[in-house]
Image (spheres, rainbow, N blue to C red):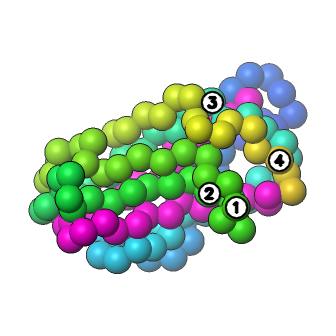
Amino acid sequence: MFGSTFNPSGGGPFKIPWGAYRVISPLVATGIPYSTTINYNVDFIEWSQAIYVIGPNNGANYWTLDLVDLNNTVNYSTFNSNLIPANAWGVVQKKPLTVSSFLSSKMGLVLVCTIVGAPGGLFVAGPDLTAI
């Protein structure tokens, strides 16, 4: 389980825990490395994501990372890997998210990593998602 505090009953911001879902790292094709179950209504306030791209990572060759619900009907936030230099770990922070309110009927989230062009392999650390 990734993440730290877990307090859906109140008391301030808390981290959403994540687990490995499929192939984790390095990704060399579109994949879903992490997932989480969320069985309550929450509001997301920040997503931080550490990534490392081996080799090409530019405007034509990059990865998109998306936080989507389990049925792929709502995209809560997205970013492109080319925000981080190639061959170096970097962290992207998204605040606020594109869609911040999560309903328990969505049941959970996955991190979808999609290849665009021919970027290098993608190492992805566990997502850091803060909610209230």
Q: Earlier in the sequence, mark 2 or mark 3?
A: 3
- Secondary structure beneath dot 1 equals loop
Which residues make up the magenta segment?
106-132
Vertical arrangement, residue 126 with respect to residue 113, above or below:
above
Q: Quadrant of residue 96?
A: top right
| Percent x, y of residue 85 | 17, 45
Q: Earlier in the sequence, mark 1 or mark 3?
A: 3
- The residue at the point 68 percent across, 54 percent down is 74
28 with respect to 34 (left or right): left
The kind of residue on which mark 2 rests is: Val
Residue of label 1: 73
Vertical arrangement, residue 125 with respect to residue 95, above or below:
below
- The residue at the point 21 percent across, 71 percent down is 118
Residue of label 4: 103
Residue of label 2: 68
Q: Is residue 4 visible?
A: no
- The residue at the point 68 percent across, 36 percent down is 100
Q: Earlier in the sequence, mark 2 or mark 4?
A: 2
Q: Earlier in the sequence, mark 2 or mark 1?
A: 2
Say if mark 1 contacts mark 3, CB within 8 Å.
no
> How many C-alpha atoms fall within 10 Å of the one at disc 4: few (<14), some, or many (≥20)?
some
Q: Quadrant of residue 68?
A: bottom right
Q: Earlier in the sequence, mark 4 or mark 1?
A: 1
**Real-space Cα distance between discs 2 and 3?**
15 Å
- Secondary structure beneath dot 2 equals strand
**Real-space Cα distance between discs 2 and 1?**
7 Å
Depth check, mark 2 against mark 1: the one in front is 1
Residue of label 3: 45
- Secondary structure beneath dot 4 equals loop
Vertical arrangement, residue 91 with respect to residue 120, above or below:
above
